[in-house]
Amino acid sequence: MLSSQRHGNSAYRDVPGIYTHIADPNERRRMALAEVDKAPFGWYHVRLVVVTGIGFFTDAYSLFAINLASIMLGIVYWQDSNGGVMPHGADTAIKVATSAGAILGQFVFGFLADLLGRKRMYGVELMIIISATLAQSLCGSSTALSFVGVIIFYRVVMGIGVGGDYPLSAVITAEFASTKYRGGIVAAVFAMQGLGQLAASLMAFILVIGYRKELEPVRLVADCTGECGATVDRMWRFLIGFGGIPGWFALYYRLTIPETPRYTFDVLYDVEKAAMDARRYRFGKEGNGLNPYQLAHSRQEMAKYRTPRPTVGEALRYFCQKTNAIKLLGTSFSWFFLDLAFYGIGLSSPSLLSVMGFDKKTNVYENLKNTATGQLVLICAGAIPGYWMTVFTVDKLGRKPIQIGGFAILTIIFCILGFAYNELSQRHLLALYVLAQFFFNFGPNATTFITPAEIFPTRVRSTGHGISAGMGKLGAVIAQTVFAPMIKKGATHDNPTPWIHGVMQIFALFMFLGMLTSLLIPEGKGQSLEELAGEKHDVYELQFRSGFFGGERGGRGRGGGRAGMGRGRDSDETHRWWKLG
């Protein structure tokens, strides 16, 4: 009988074993998930955004800081050989290394989060990021190793952690968020990237101001030796190393976050622990203990429904089904086409800085300060407003309209940039760049992160997101390795980027293709994750019937005995999870 004893904390009157009087495990699952899906917006959602978003803040900081640090690295390590400027090949390799590592991290962590659990993997990727960030800030050259090789190695390792953060943070946030606010909450996690970019530029600006006395007397980067060189060497290490500090504050909460109730229900088949974790997430640890006898009894009862952990073969079979393959095609290639242009548009940043008057290089101090200031202005003007516009509107307008609309507007912008580039003034280019940044982020850059975390079943949700994100990072690698050299084809001193208009035309095509592939994905607004994935609410009931009412082993009725435990192999194959829908 349900006890009326009061427990819990000041925010919630919790009753231990609140669902234990319900015999049907499907009903217990439905009620526990309803606690999560129908919960009003509260501080637990803010806490979720902060804990998961810190990873994206760190990711974006590290990715963006290297763009500013590369100038400093050139001064320190290429002073004698290249006049204080990093060679293009080394610059590209260092910047691409993180994206290359991210591809591996997204695939591997995406699958492991489905196989081993979200909780077990969460925090591991952040420890990798923190460690690799610290290692980068301490590395240098030697007679045995080149500086470029060492820093590329650590940036690949960091990229693995960055890649792992994508599926883990997206899926954990989506599985804990209320249905009504899920899109905005997941978008808020992703929007922390904008704050990370802002922090990187701000940190660079503060360092330059702090070391003004040492930098200002030196006119050219080629003359930055002695005290000036030592100062810049300290600056880039502080700039890179600071990126790992925010992760320390989130690491404890990531390592102690409860497993998502959906994973515990649908993969571990532990209804008691799943119900407890749902309450623990919302209301804290107090009053959420379980009676050991009830827990053992429940797990014994649920053993008759248990299925194996997800495997690579099961995921392949699921995604090879036509309907599921179409969804994955839509999420993967829309992200792929997006990142081709999203990372490619950054190739025009130097010319934009000159438009805004931030290209003055009267001395090393002015050079570094203007670069940091210009990046601050560009981020605040377009990127950050776009991120937060998505946060506040995605649950009202829907994911699909924002994504398709964003791709359509970006197609027009890149057509203008491509076909009318020579007729545009510098101010027109600046305006179009800011608009592009706004509609990237109030558009597909945010929604391609949200949708894969919603439309796949729990058992393959993280794998599906990892594949989609990996395709996006593949587009980023191609943008930096193929299109960056392409814009300089036939370059002269007067025209360093003669083919930039042709690249913009190609990006316009990619945006159009992204719009078409976006038509393949379903709208997630206002629907539960189970509805979007096509999962039935009676997932246990289907397997229960196969053992108890199929006449195979002569079960004793609903909820009784251990009937159904001895189902044959043929029966297991018939009722595999991917065929239940």
Image (cartoon, rainbow, N blue to C red):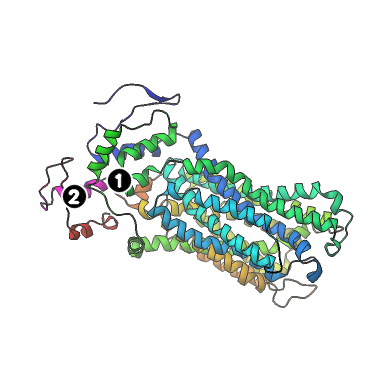
In the image, which residues are magenta?
A: 537-554
Kind of element beneath mark 1: loop
Query: Is 298 located above or below residue 441 in the figure?
Result: above
State the mark number for residue 463.
none
Residue 451 rendering spot, x and y as whole percentages:
45, 53
**At 81% across and 58% down in the image, what residue appears?**
229
**At 28% across and 24% down in the image, what residue appears?**
3
Q: Nearer the viewer, residue 323 or 418?
A: 323
Q: Nearer the viewer, residue 339 or 82?
A: 82
Is 519 left, or right, of 60 in this rendering? left
Is 46 left, or right, of 541 in this rendering? right
User: Where, quadrant-wise, is the N terminus in this rendering?
Assistant: top left
Q: Is residue 553 magenta?
A: yes
Question: Would residue 47 be visible to someone looking at this image?
Answer: yes
**At 69% across and 65% down in the image, what residue appears?**
147
Residue 359 rendering spot, x and y as whole percentages:
80, 59
Disc 2 target residue: 565
Instruction: Specify few, some or many for label 2: CA neighbours under 10 Å numbering under 14, 14-19, or 20 or more.
Output: some
Labels 2 and 1: the sequence-earlier one: 1
Select label 2 or label 1 by which is in front: 2
Kind of element beneath mark 2: loop
State the mark number for residue 269.
1
Instruction: Specify few, some or many for label 1: CA neighbours under 10 Å numbering under 14, 14-19, or 20 or more.
Output: many
Q: Is residue 114 magenta?
A: no
Q: Give the amino acid type for the residue marked by disc 2 in the picture.
A: Met
